[in-house]
Amino acid sequence: MTEVPKIVYDRLRAARPERALPDRALPERAGPERTHPDADLLTAFAEQALAATERDGVLEHLAFCGDCREVIALALPAADIVAAPIATETAVRATPVPAKSERNFLTAFAWPSLRWAALAAGVAVVASVLLVHPGKLNKATLPSVNRQVATTAPPVSAPQIAPSSTDQAAISARTSEARPKSESRLSKKLNAGEAVTPPPRAERGMLLAENKNHSGQADKLSAAPSAGVLFDAPTNPRTTETVEVSGAAAAEEVAPAAEDSLMAWNETPAIEKAKPALQEKEMKVNEQQKTQAAVVPGLARSQARAMMSSAKLASPASPALAHNVTWVIIGGVLQRSVDSGQSWQNVLRTDHPLLCYASHEEDVWAGGQAGTLFHSADGGTTWVQVQPSIKAQQLSSDVTHIDVRGDVRGDERGPAEIAISTSNNGIWSSADGGRTWEKK
Amino acid sequence: MPRPVQPGHGADVAAAFYERSGAAAYGVSTEQFAAILDEILCKYLSQNSAHDSARASAEQKADFCAGLRLEELALARACAAGNERAWQDFIARYRQKLHGMALHITRDGAHAAELADSLFADLYGVNARNGVRSSKLVFYTGRGSLEGWLRTVMAQEFINRYRKQKRTVSLEEQTEEGVQFRAAVPEPACASDRLSQERLEAATDEALAELSSEDRFTLASYYLDGRTLAEIARTLGLHESSVSRRLDRLATGLRKRILAGLRLQGMSHAQAMEALETDVRDIGLNLRSRLTQDSGAKTFPEGKVPAQDAGKGSHD
């Protein structure tokens, strides 16, 4: 901000408020503060509710009276409660501006105006570059954008979700070629206001990826499944099983590179062709992530993203997401949702309130107060109480945390490894699915 | 004593306003509400000679009343009159907000509670005059929102309290604040400096007098009171960028006008620039620096220095 000479501070401070009251526009009050506008007028002024003449009168006073300025400033509502009133300078100015303070016509060409012109020119240049070279820019931005697509992709139908590996390679190879054409096609449809029918998988994926750049259009697309206007494909929960990675071992091998795979999908075709085997795995993981987001159309985008991130963090191939089952403990009762949180059902209520749970595929464990521990091997349909004990010493303290890890040998599912943390800092573990226990 | 609304003149309008205000729910009669409106009309329309209350047409009165917050006015006046239901509504709507406002103003929990409780007591009217409870809500006229009015009244109360406390600061507290070390404002030493200062003040006053009240308010709020652009923008109903641009324009324009004023008083451009850059508060500092330079020049004069003198100087 441009500084003013120090003398201006002094003269502003030295000005007396009495000079500001030449007329009788302001109602006066009895007492020593008779010259100040009353609280009603100050409030109305701050709320832009005064007529022009009265507003001028109050402003005239405020220009000289630091006390009233302070009252006005203190009485401003908190910024987070009431948004700042935004109006154009000309719209708010109810009275004609005095001639002496009118902006000179020449000031329209002063530096502030030129700054805006420079900004507009910059925007025009960027827009023109985007239009002329969309492919290069998209190539640079797609890796990050594609991750968003994984969380916001609309539901897709089953036949499109699991293409063959040869299709995948072909799709990858022609990705960069199809991009500009598909983008222009979609933008035309959006501009024309048509309902867009779902294009083939590769095109749709790229369309979504590319159109994340155009935030408004992308929002329409991502919001479309719930609205049922655009991409109105039916949701099929079984689609998740068709693309499920076959086993935790394979998932552990692929998932750590999931971020890389998302990037690799957008590399040049030559690179992709050089790694067909890896690409196949990566594509499957990518498809799985897309589908996990796609099968929860009712969820908000942030929820879907949170689920995706938790799925990445919790376990490589979270069964709760793969089977669309979500667990939660509310009020000491374990609840399950099989429709991504839209409806919930109580599945386990015990004598002592439950405190924690853990799940791995169909295995679900729930622990609570006073050594309560239950196990379900069928995804929560039936429950068996487990009483951990070592040499006649039974678990009696509260179970505060459960960690369960599947043991996969080849295609066969072995017993789960389970570790329990208790409220007295003890750790109980079992390597055979809860039959025998060790205490650490 | 307010004049009642004349039948046939504004009775229908007053009845419509009465209906709109919902005053009936608080036990305020039509006549009582009309009297309240008349009181407000007298207060505001009679203040402006162009809108004398006696000459103000029914349309003008109706327009004025239509701009009032009638529902909140009825609530406030019913509270002032001691209506139980009105107080219930008031407490439900504003009791919690009062604490929020106080906290926003004082930024301190203990002071906020004290301020809010004090204002609530004033609103309820604990101070009786001639045996009649006097509520502060009777001063609310509905020009702005009741919530905004409460904030303003609270801000006024806060400033009054702050001043009272400031006046009663003990000598020990002043000592702790370092008042005794505060440098006195130096007076201009010589007559030429004093003349230059007077010319500068006159030119600045003239330049400031040419500003519109809104410009001057903006200038004083930003440079004198230290308000933020956002606060000024919200007060004036502008965008922050508009205020920023206006301040830039004002600062540049003021400088030009002051310089032009100084030149009109017979100063050259260089003298005007020097006078503008020199402030009375800086004179002492400038003199000190000048003295330091002078003494340094004497200690280490340019040119050849005799070896003996140089040796003496170094030992001294």
Image (spheres, rainbow, N blue to C red):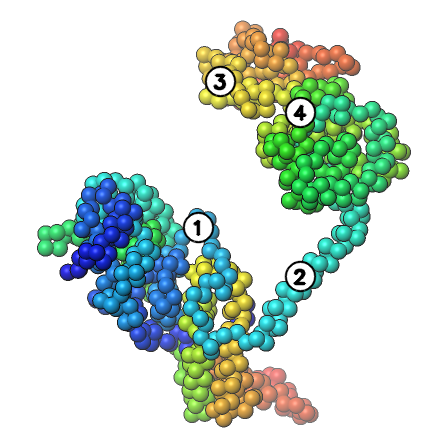
Q: Amino acid at mark 2?
A: Ala
Chain for disc number 4? A
Q: Residues within 10 Å of mark 4 (few under 14, many from 20)?
A: some
Q: Are marks 4 and 1 on the same chain?
A: yes
Report helix, strand or loop for mark 1. loop
Can residue A327 be spotted in the picture? Answer: yes
Of residues A313 and A424, the one drawn nearer to the viewer in this rendering: A313
Q: Earlier in the sequence, mark 2 or mark 3?
A: 2
- Which residue is label 3 attached to? A333
Q: Residues within 10 Å of mark 3 (few under 14, many from 20)?
A: many
In this rendering, position of residue A404 left or right of residue B267: right
Chain for disc number 3? A
- Residue A120 image label: 2
- Which residue is label 4 attached to? A234
Q: Are marks 2 and 1 on the same chain?
A: yes
Q: Earlier in the sequence, mark 3 or mark 1?
A: 1
Chain for disc number 2? A
